[in-house]
Image: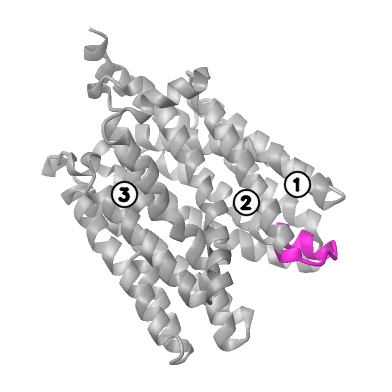
Amino acid sequence: MAALRQYLVVWRIPGAPALFVFGIIGRLGIGMTPLALLLLVEDVTGRYSLAGVAGGIYAVAGAVLSPLAGRIADRIGPTPVLLVTGVAHPLALLALVLAHSRGLAVIYAATAVAGATFPPLTAALRGAWHDVTAPSTGRYALRNLALAAETALFELVFVLGPLLVSGFLLFGDPTSALLGAGGVTLVGTLAVALGKVMRGWQPHPPSAHAKGFGPLGVAGFLPLLVCVFGLGTAFGATGVTVPAFATAEGVADPDGLAGVLLAVWAVGSAVGGFWFGTRRLADNMTRQFAVLLALLSGTFAVFALMPSPLWLGIALVFGGVVIAPGLTVENTMVGRIAPASMLNEAYTWIVTVSVAASAVGGAVAGWLVDRAGVPWAFIFAGVAVAVGALVAAPARGPIARAEKTAAVRLEGALEPEAV
């Protein structure tokens, strides 16, 4: 009950309910569109390899253009960017549905447009949570709670998205699921864009606008992206390795089993995230991040030893508990290291690197499954996260130095609040 009361305080922040509720609705497409697209292209071509290419095009197109959208949002505000992309993306999915019978080249072109126009909603939301918990608002003490809730609730996208696709398939086909994904993206994105928090965005002086490499040139940010890459690689690898594990078990419905196993992993993460949000962040945030990454790395070694789906499911639940806390600290550090005038772009780089790393992780894991077996694919995922832990761990490393600088800057910003 005490934890619930803490989250109720966050819920009562002006504009917070819309960020939570419509933020999830607007991102359900993240869990729906890749699966619906895979099924649509496989229906048309009869080949999963070609369907996989379509999924890759969709992901890469979004990842490449996302930082540009983030930079524009930092300059003119997130609302215009979300309004344009919130309408353009559903229209692109509609075009894909209408043109999917006209050949593979048309499908790939429409897929690229759909991926490129997906709203940068995650970056905008995390930037918004930083704004409403800025030191000047007197709510800075609620930032960890808010980011933990945002991170934990985001896990629902990966649970509910595939379930919604299954629901559409009961009454229609993959095209209906794509249209449904476009619908929830439209409703959720426009509601967030027109909400109180986004409309209250304050412009930054032109002298503070990102130039050149933007946040990539900020001390400590590139090493932090290495950690993000390790996490993304592990998540992508797991998305391939768990289905391979289910197939190797010879069950009647390996796809269904894989979906359940990945869902319980996400549930474990959500539970861990909600619990972590009620804890006070460590004074040495860099060390806390490194420890969480090390613990997560160790869970993959445990997964590799599991003898049956039941045991793997249990291990995934407990192993998932570490994910959201690690991501919460990561998101907090991004907001502390990156200047406020580059926050949207910084968070879009986090998404871009995660997507790229996930593709790499999935490809390598698939190769390992075929040549060395499922356990080695899990080990590979663990090693990827361990590399991130090693990058974050040094007490005098670039991330630690950047975090110390950010802590001094934050202390100065909090002094008027204390007075």
The amino acid type of the residue labelled 3 equals Glu
Magenta stretch: dominant SS?
helix
Indicate which disc residue 235 carries: none
Rendering quarter of residue 392: top right
- The residue positioned 45% from the left and 56% from the top of the image is 28
Q: Give the total number of marks visible in the rendering.
A: 3
Pointer 2 residue:
234
Left or right of residue 244, residue 58 in this image: left
Q: Position of residue 182 (x, y in %)?
A: 38, 66
- The residue shown at (63%, 79%) is 48
Question: Badge 3: how crowded within 10 Å, few (<14), some, or many (20+)?
Answer: many
> Is disc 2 placed on a helix, strand or loop?
helix
The residue singled out by tag 1 in the image is: 313
Tell me the CA gap for discs 1 and 2.
17 Å
The residues colored magenta run 242-255
Q: For the view shown, which residue lies furthest in the right direction? A: 307
List x then y, in percent, for residue 307.
87, 49
Q: Residue furthest top?
A: 419
Q: Is residue 214 magenta?
A: no
Q: Quadrant of residue 244?
A: bottom right
Instruction: Tell me, yes or no, whether the highlighted magenta stretch contains residue 246.
Output: yes
Query: Up-down: is 37 above or below 104?
Result: above
Q: Position of residue 278 (x, y in %)?
A: 50, 22
Front residue of 225/39: it is 39
Mark 1 or mark 2: whose residue is earlier in sequence? 2
Kindly report which numbered mark, 1 or 3, lies closer to the viewer in this rendering: 1
- Outermost front residue: 171
